[in-house]
Image (tube, rainbow, N blue to C red):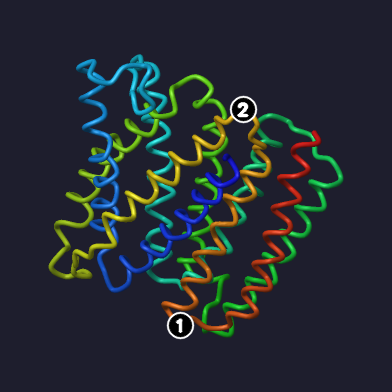
Amino acid sequence: MWFYLALSSALLLGIYDVFKKASLNNNAVLPVLMVSITSSAVMFIPLLLLSSNKVLTAEHELFIPDITLNEHLQVLLKSIIVLTSWIFSFFALKHLSITIVTPIRATGPLWTLLGAIVIFSEQLNPIQWTGIIITLSFFYLFSTTGKTEGISFKNNKWFWFIIIATISGAASGLYDKHLLHKVDRLAVQCWFSIYQSFLMLPIILLLWWPKRETSTTFKFRWTIPLIGITLVLADYIYFKAVSQSDALISVISAIRRGGVIIAFTFGAILFKEQNIKKKAFFLTGILIGIALLIYGSTLS
């Protein structure tokens, strides 16, 4: 069962990226992010109310337990980290092709592992070192494809935006190792979404609203709320897969990372992007490196 749940989560993550690109094309970034985040929060509010009023109890799968003030602060910190990642990634995805963004995002486990080395003094085995070398090599080769599309990665700020988004996303992954061992995962999903909605309000009011007449116009599209909905479903299914007693977390992580293939394929077809064969080859190399990193982690 966990294998099919992991596949479903990966599929939803791929569709999530396609919805983002479709929503951001020729659209105002911050309102798109605000609506998508709010749609996630709205999904949890009925469950939160039903749980608070004891209609849902601990025996129910969708029960959201109360958490302490300290736990709320920890979830708030996660919200800040992830919102930082999303702001940078949304801006990058608007200005870059999805077949450039998704391979870069696929390197997330590399940065998580490097962070674990620095923060937790983890030691790498030969398989992990091989994975790092392969990932970085194909990542460098992939960066050369931008020149054929008139993009200089060295001087393109949107490229650095997606790098910042990927590294801050990796930081969130490291933080999750600490947080999800202490706080109920559905409570984290719920309050994480709600806090992000509140955090977006001053950003919208200060950065977008005063300049809305002179900047890119916001156009509501049905794909925008689906960004938040697909992400919530993907994460919920992922956590359900991990909770299975016979689940292999290394296999689940590899399958989930494979969601970029869905986004890459749909993006290539729907948005008619360039240099697909070359990008696909480099993406395959990156994913092989990531798979070795994940496999090597099971041997440590």
Residue 272 is tagged as 1
Looking at the picture, does residue 211 appear above or below residue 187?
Answer: below
Q: Nearer the viewer, residue 158 or 139?
A: 139
The three-letter amino acid code for the residue at tag 1 is Lys
Element type at marker 1?
loop
Give the quadrant of residue 90: bottom left
- Point 71% across, 45% down: residue: 294
Residue under label 2:
245
Q: Mark 1, residues whose alpha carbon is within 10 Å: few (<14), some, or many (≥20)?
A: few
Q: Percent from the top left, x then y, of residue 101?
A: 51, 65
Report the number of discs. Answer: 2
Residue type indicated by callout 2? Ser
Q: Is residue 151 left or right of residue 21?
A: right
User: Mark 2 falls on what kind of element?
Assistant: loop
Distance in Å between CA atoms under marks 1 and 2: 42 Å
Outermost residue, right side: 126
- Indicate left or right for 70 with 194 as reference: right
Toward the viewer: 21 or 164? 21
Q: How many residues crowd around disc 2 within 10 Å: few (fewer than 14), some, or many (20 or more)?
A: few
Which residue is pictured at 38% across the width and 16% down the height?
Answer: 70
Residue 57 relative to residue 296: left or right: left
Q: Position of residue 120 (x, y in %)?
A: 68, 29
Q: Quadrant of the C terminus?
A: top right
Query: In x, y percent, where is residue 186?
Result: 39, 29
User: Foreground: 198 or 64?
Assistant: 64
The residue under the point 49% across, 35% down is 240
**Residue drawn at (67%, 36%) of the image:** 116
**Dot 1 or dot 2, earlier in sequence:** 2
Question: Which circle marks residue 97 in the picture?
Answer: none
